[in-house]
Amino acid sequence: MSGEVRSLSAQVHDAFAAALRQVDLAGADPLVRPSDHADFQSNAAMALAKRAGTKPRDLAERLAAAVREQPGAPAGVELSGPGFLNVSIDDRTVWRQVEQRLAAPRLGIAESRSGERTVIDYSGPNIAKEMHVGHLRTTILGDALARVLDGLGSEVIRQNHLGDWGTQFGMLIQYLDEHPEAVWRPEDLAEGAVATTSALDELYRQARARFEADPGFGDRARDRVVALQSGDETTLARWRELVAQSQRAFQAIYDRLGVLLTPEDSRGESFYNDQLAEVVDELVKAGVAVESDGALCVFSDEFTGPGGDPVPLIVRKRDGGYNYATTDLATIRYRIRDLKASRILYVVDARQAMHFQMIFATARRMGWLTEGIEAVHVPFGAVLGPDGKPFKTRSGGAARLMELLDSAVDRARREIEGRAHDLDAAELERIVADAGIGAVKYADLSTSRTKDYVFDVDRMVSFNGNTGVYLQYAHTRIRSILRKAGDADTEVTADAPLQPAERALVLLLDGMGGTLDEVASSLEPHRLCGYLFALAKAFTDFYESCPVLKAGDERVRGNRLALCRLVGDSLARGLGLLGIAAPERM
RNA sequence: GCCCCCGUAGCUCAGCGGAUAGAGCAGGAGACUUCUAAUCUCCAGGUCGCAGGUUCGAGUCCUGCCGGGGGCACCA
């Protein structure tokens, strides 16, 4: 009992696949697509005519005849043009689809990814530094992918690969040791958690400045790194405190953004420390890593540098230290060997494409990454400032994430506050936050993932066009209608009339599962955004031409209410899968 | 030099090998005693970077150019 409601598209596909078997073309793709000229169309006859040794139109005729014989064949199959088969669905079947989806769990969408275990690596901020614009996309995209895959039945394991280890901690801890008066804990401040992130960032800047200006301090900081690595307890205690405070600051952002990450999902670099030597040993024993210029490296002729020489993946530096390549190899090994992932996603900046290719290639050579396991770098483009260049503050630093969110929420407040509403202050503020945060997330998710995009608050919080607020608003209008109807149980009468706008809406609703499957395989959430926008527009067409509450006929009214409910639920579900709130009223 | 990504309307971007390439913004003209106008309707706007190739059919696939961005030894 999966609760799946087969989509009309899938049913047409099945009927055509069976018909193709009958005309000795078993296994051929029926090429069923939504159509501007009918409900669906099959383009198979033109593609297969040569193989069948006939003219496209003749094959199409035979195929149409065979389709009509199938049990559950679509109502109409008509030849058109050079060999298109236009398929139409009868009204009853369309209404039944609404009825079944409303009755089914999860809108009748199949759990097409069940049995799969997906590890998703995303966000990955650095301890003792503030989250900035550079963490926006990985956090939002990763979270949406986690939600979509989980929604399709995949077992999702979120991994927040925190930058919680490295030489910078020697500097920080030493600085704190020498400046006990430094203000960086939340209890030192009146403002609370938000201010803490800035305080930590400030601490980092001060320590860095000192490190660069004072060679003596530099030496003591380096000694402190050694102490940290060798497990000196007072140093470790200080490190743990830094990690804990940073995590609190990150959590404040995650909570505000509404992403699923919690401290339990943290598996930072430090987690892999005691595996690094073993990983390098394995690499050397397998002959995969070799010594070069004092360092241990993995070479491959796929990757060459400016001189045409092979570029190494350095797994142990000349000074004996390990770097992020070593950690990433330990990480992929852990995810395969211990977490038993069948799919591993790295939602990381596009600039690291080559690095991940090298990591994956090495993991394959080591026999860790095998045929049945999919490791994917999910790259994304940069967030640009209004000038079209990488987003920077006036002082040249990366823009702080909290400030970006503030600016979007403030902008949303200005937009919403003045409008007529009967909301109390608390509810208004919650809606403002939902709208502002949703706007940022939707703007990020709705553009094609691999491209750069400009962070433009005015546009993303605009209530027109392909924005989060437009979708949220469409949802609230539907809820409003349902409330006015008294939230009665909706009953579908399958033999009531069906208007073109209703038909178009149902066909679109019926395709949500297909869209989610596409998102799951392409790892492109913008497809879901495009789908939801089209759905909201199709609803608007329906809203304009089909009165719901004012419909005279009881059956028509009932059907339209059912349709409203299904659209509302689908929008809420879709927004939810993107990690965006769908308020009941705005 | 090699590798990766991108090039579609004035701007920002969609577009699963199929019929006439679509949205939003900006521009022009209209529609509110509303089922929430935070909306909708209509108009205008295109050598899909260029050139070949594959195909019955190419914005979409392949090759080569041109232009933009990014990456390429001990930072992550």
Image (cartoon, coloured by chain):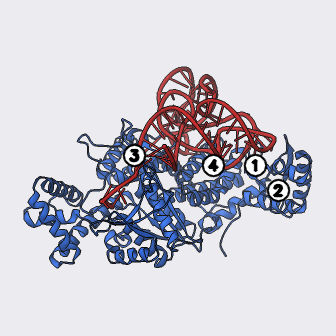
Task: Name the disc covering residue A39, or none.
Answer: 1
Residue A522 seen in the figure:
yes
Q: Mark 2, chain letter?
A: A
Name the one closer to the observer, A335 or A360.
Answer: A360
Does A76 sit left or right of A152 as displayed? right
| Nearer the observer, A56 or B70 | B70
**Do the numbered discs 1 and 4 sit on residues whose CB atoms are within 8 Å?**
no
The quarter holding residue A546 reads: top right
Q: Which chain is red?
A: B
Residue A578: image x %, image y %? 49, 57
Chain of the residue under the numbered disc 3 shown in the image: A
User: Camera-side residue: A258 or A491?
Assistant: A258
Name the residue tied to disc 3. A383
How far separated are the C-alphas under marks 1 and 3?
Answer: 39 Å
Q: Earlier in the sequence, mark 4 or mark 2?
A: 2
Residues at marks 1 and 2 touching, judged by CB atoms closer than 8 Å = yes
Q: Are marks 1 and 3 in contact (CB under 8 Å)?
A: no
Please name the amino acid that badge 2 sits on.
Answer: Pro
Q: Label 3 sits on what residue type?
A: Val
